[in-house]
Amino acid sequence: MLASRRSFLMGAAALSAAVVTPETVRAMAAMQASADWALATADLEGDVARRVMQRVHGRAPAGLEGALFRNGPGKFRRPGGSATHWFDGDGLMRAFRVRDGQATLEARFADTPKRRWESEIDAVVTPGFGTPGGERARIGSPNDANAANTAVMAAGDEVWALWEGGSPMAMDAGDLSTKRFVTLRDDLKGMPFQAHPRYDPDGTVWNIGLWGDQMIVWRLNADRSLHTAEVVPLPRASYMHDFTATARHLVIVMQPWVFDHHTMPYAAQFAWKPELGTQVMVIDKADLSRTRIFELPTFSYFHLGDAWEDGSGTIRFDVAAGKDVQFAMEGARVMVEGRGTVPGEPAQLSLITLHTDGRAEMTSSGITAEFPRSDPRRAGLARRYTAHVAGERGGRPLPTGLAVHDWETGRSDAFDFGDGVIMEEAVWVPKPGRSGERDAWLVAPAINLRAGVTELHAFDAARVADGPVASWRADIALPAGFHGLWVG
Amino acid sequence: MIRIATLAAAALMALTAVPARADDATITLTFETGATTGKVMVALFNSEGSYQSSQPVAAQQIDASGSVVAVFDHLPPGDYAVKAFHDVNGDGQMNTNPFGIPVEPYAFSNNAVGNMGPASWARAHFTVSGDTAQTISIR
């Protein structure tokens, strides 16, 4: 299988000048035993020039025109030392472009100071979320550690590769070449800008950046220029990968994974304290000093869905909720090892309700889910559906299918490819001229493990169980990405 | 992690001129700046102790509108290191963002970069036995 062969060759190259010891033989044997999902965290050795994808199923729906930009780690291992955590690979920007029924794929690494230095010395030395780093790290500012590997924001003729501890990295949307770190105002240079901005219907962008128990709240105009930035104190120094928003409020979800002591890697600074419960702070977008606190039972999370509120002011949002931080601390390490068992249980799609009288409740759908996404036309507004990846099981990481959950009926419209496929996050692509919530396609890549290649699938959001309406196949496999964005 | 860098960078702000000891060597430092406003503040150190405590043996402020060259002369042979920052807006301070991270460029001799802090003496120092020149990128 391709993954094993690739790992083996890499290992063999690294050992070429070494004596073959019993340890070496054992290590080689272990590499041979790579998990079938190991292609998800394989290394990509360089940029991938634009190539045509072959249509292997269905027909491209008329009106599906645009580009899916996706970001995610693409390179973990170097001879002198490697990233040991899934979140710490070099950012690789992918572009799946669909036009006239044809699809193409290309990918380029974000040309960060981290990647430049580590390429020069052929060793990963920069500390990250879960990678300790080494003596040779060169970090004079947060952006020197910026992997630019998490998500994407569109900005005119640029796409911004987002991380969470530093600035966006601007890349050219046409050829994915790296331009510069984005400074939204000179006095805010290097401030953290997280990976999950939220959007108002008028194009206003909201985002946060965390620094202990302080948070900068970014508000950008539709043209991506800065409107305002304000520092807001937080009741606890919680690790947060995401936040959400309604049309009127920001919703900050503080899991009980809280700052404990300064150390590296970054995640090791936080202690899991389930006895604290999970707190939610709701902030008035019109006056960031107006806040309310809600208390919820303990859960962990990485990803939230868009929030909405009804006429009474009751706020609702979904979350891919976990029980603890085992995946973040240990599972993501196993992912890069490419073998072994990933501990912990997969997250479940849950709905959180914040009542106007201060009560908060959480209801689990019982469905395994990650990467919740919803109709961008309804961002911050009332909605009924959530798309998510599905099929992950305890012990085997990564999802195998896609589903749309209906919060009104509790029904799940799901399709599963089976263990031969790793499903990646799907984005909603509204059908032109239509306005119904499910008048959309869900577009997502997947890794076909049997063929050893990356595929692109388009589903009808109203009929997911029917399977993709169109599928295209590349002649290469890219490692699994994290988050994407459709630009029509 | 960058708090350490901030503290060290703050130390750069207290640049005070100290008379050089009479001797023969000259250090010429050419700075490549990303802006042409304000001044580049340059501090020269002649020992690890002085470097760590930010007690420069000499210091200069170079206008950034033209070529930015700092010349330290009449120096005795020995080991030296340089800390510099570009006061782009000319307010005499090293400005930081709301979380304390420097927003004005700073640099060290050898173009050394620190590891979650200022560049160490080990990375930044260089040996002077005669006339010595370095080009330092400060962007």
Image: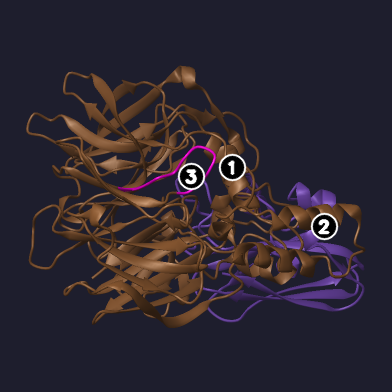
Residue type at mark 2 is: Ala
Foreground of the two, A105 or A153: A105
Which numbered disc covers residue B122?
A: 2
Which numbered disc covers residue A266?
A: 1
Q: Is residue A305 above or below residue A437?
A: above
Image quadrant holding the N terminus of chain A, namely: bottom right
Question: In the drawing, does residue A190 fall left or right of residue A319?
Answer: right
Mark 1–mark 2 CB contact (< 8 Å): no
Residue at 63% x, 59% y is A76
Question: In the drawing, does residue A332 fall left or right of residue B118?
Answer: left
Task: Please name the color used to draw chain B.
Answer: purple
Q: Nearer the viewer, mark 1 or mark 3?
A: 1
Residue A351 magenta-highlighted: no
Mark 1–mark 3 Cα distance, whole angstroms, equals: 17 Å
Of all chains in the rendering, the one displayed in brown is: A
Label 1 residue SS: helix
Residue range highlighted in magenta: A388-398
